[in-house]
Image (cartoon, rainbow, N blue to C red):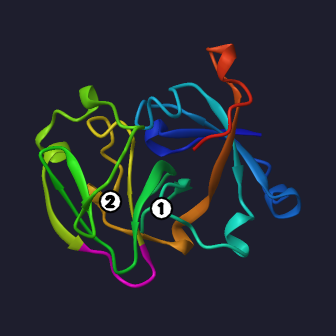
Amino acid sequence: FFFTISFILITGFSFANRRNVIGFDILSMGVPVMQPTVQQGDKFLVDTWIYKNDNPERGDIVAHSFDGQKGLYLNRIIAKENDRIEIKNGTVILNGLTLTESYVLSVNVTRPESKNMKELIIPKGHYFVMGDNRDASFGDSRFSGTITIGNIEGKITDIISSKDKSRIGITVR
């Protein structure tokens, strides 16, 4: 059946318990928080089994929730436990080094909260996530805190439908 997640952040075709059998869900991006990587309206596969054997890594794009909030969000893991992260003049500093983020366009880093953030040390077992479109991403760790593995539904793998037909079949990175 089809359902809409709260705040219309991600919509999905849920297969209920089938994700436990086949290990995938199909979701759609309703807002531009991951542009240009995932375009508004793109439909994509979510591997719901990947983190049963592997740990999430920096750079993974995950469908997740936040404790105490309804809905699913789509963000990129930027930092993990024991990492130090801060933002200075729109640049992410991870463990004292500038993070190269070719997926973030400079036109998407103009708001104050996208330009600066005090240093934060990520707690054990937690992940810091942000949208690639920093100015449009209000459902990320800058605003709602870090997430745990229990908050992660799965990792985004491939675009399966898009207004731009050339995007179909792209592996999301």
For badge 2, the amino acid type reads: Ser
Q: Which mark is residue 58?
A: 1
Q: Secondary structure at mark 1?
A: loop
95, 135: nearer the viewer: 95
**Residue placed most toward the observer, 41 or 91:** 91
Q: Residue at x 68, y 32 (%)?
A: 170
List x then y, in percent, for residue 128.
37, 64
Q: Residue at x 42, y 63 (%)?
A: 66
Evaluate whether residue 170 shows in this view.
yes
| Horizontal side, residue 101 vs residue 18: left or right | left
Farthest right residue in view: 21
Whether residue 15 is in magenta: the answer is no
Name the secondary structure under disc 2: helix
Q: Main secondary structure of the magenta part?
A: loop
Instruction: Tell me which residue sits at (54%, 55%) in the image.
Output: 60
Percent across and percent down for residue 14 are: 73, 46
Contact between marks 1 and 2 (CB within 8 A): the answer is no
| Magenta span of residues | 121-126
